[in-house]
Structure formats: C-alpha cells, structure tokens
Image (cartoon, grey):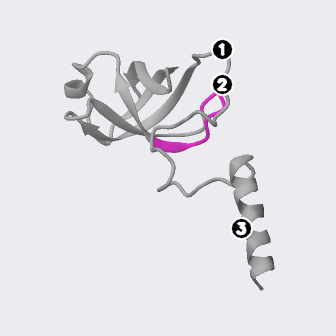
Amino acid sequence: MKSILSRIVSALLIAVSAGIVGLPHSVAAPSDHSRHAKVNGPTSTATAEGLVRKIDRQKSTVIIAHGPLPNGMPAMTMGFRPKDRAWLDQLKEGQKIRFTAEEVNGAMILKSYEAVK
C-alpha cells in the first residue's frame, strides 16, 4: 500500500513540475501570467473588449472580464494597472470597453481604452 501511494505522489509531483497538471487557482499567484503564450519577445500587446468589473483605487487596478486575447491569453477576469492613474476615476464599473493591454515584466498594463456601446 505504501509503495502504491508513494508512486502516485511521485507521479503527481512530476506532472505538476512538468506543467502537465496545473495547480489550483488559489495556489497560483493571482497575477502570474507567465504560462500564457507570448508574442514578440518579452512584451506583448493585445487589443480586446471587456467589461469593467471593479476599480480598486488602493491597488491602482482595474478588474476587467475579457474574452480570449490575441496574444494567447484565455478568457478570464483579471487586474490591469492603468497607464494613467486618472483613468481610475474615468472608468466606471459595469462599463464595456475596447482596450489595449501590454505585458511588462509579468504585469498587465492597460495602455488605452475606449467605451463600447
């Protein structure tokens, strides 16, 4: 019995470390997008549409629910740091936007946006 359990644990550890099996979202860092596809080297730009879910002024973050991004990132709800802090007062929760984001050093930066009707 101990041998079987040991083999299962070993196989699971190998699968996790090889990236075959992902960790639960609660274990992974919430803003770690390193496993998503990248284009054009260390930074990539993506244009998409999304829905502003929350504006967190304390963390200078806009939480946007978006569909799949052209850079390979799947649909999700995530935080973006706005290029201009004034946008935190201009954007509204529940607002649909078309936006451009760029990954810089592992963080997603909201580079531009426009309201979508």
Q: Main secondary structure of the magenta part?
A: loop
In reply to whether residue 73 is colored magenta, the answer given is: yes
Relative to 90, is 11 on the left or the right? right
Per the rendered image, the range of residues in magenta is 69-77
The disc, 3 or 1, on the residue closer to the chain's N-terminal end is: 3
In reply to whether residue 108 is colored magenta, the answer given is: no
Task: For marks 2 and 3, give the one nearer the viewer.
Answer: 3
| Helix, strand or loop for disc 3 | helix
Q: Residue 75 is drawn in which quadrant? A: top right
Q: Which residue is mark 1?
A: 41
Q: CA distance from mark 2 to mark 3?
A: 32 Å
Which numbered circle lies on residue 9? 3
Relative to 17, is 116 on the left or the right? left
Q: Residue at 50% across / 26% down in the picture?
A: 106
Query: Is residue 117 in view from this perspective?
Result: no
Query: Is residue 26 in view from this perspective?
Result: yes
Q: Which residue is mark 2?
A: 38
Relative to 21, is 114 on the left or the right? left
Check the image and report above or below for 99 versus 25: above
Q: Position of residue 39 (x, y in %)?
A: 68, 19
- Crowding at dot 3, Cα within 10 Å, few <14 / some 14-19 / many 20+, comes out as few
Q: Residue at 75% across / 54% down in the picture?
A: 14
Q: Quadrant of the C terminus?
A: top left
Q: Residue type at mark 2?
A: Lys
The disc, 2 or 3, on the residue closer to the chain's N-terminal end is: 3
Asked if disc 1 and disc 2 are in contact, CB closer than 8 Å, the reply is yes
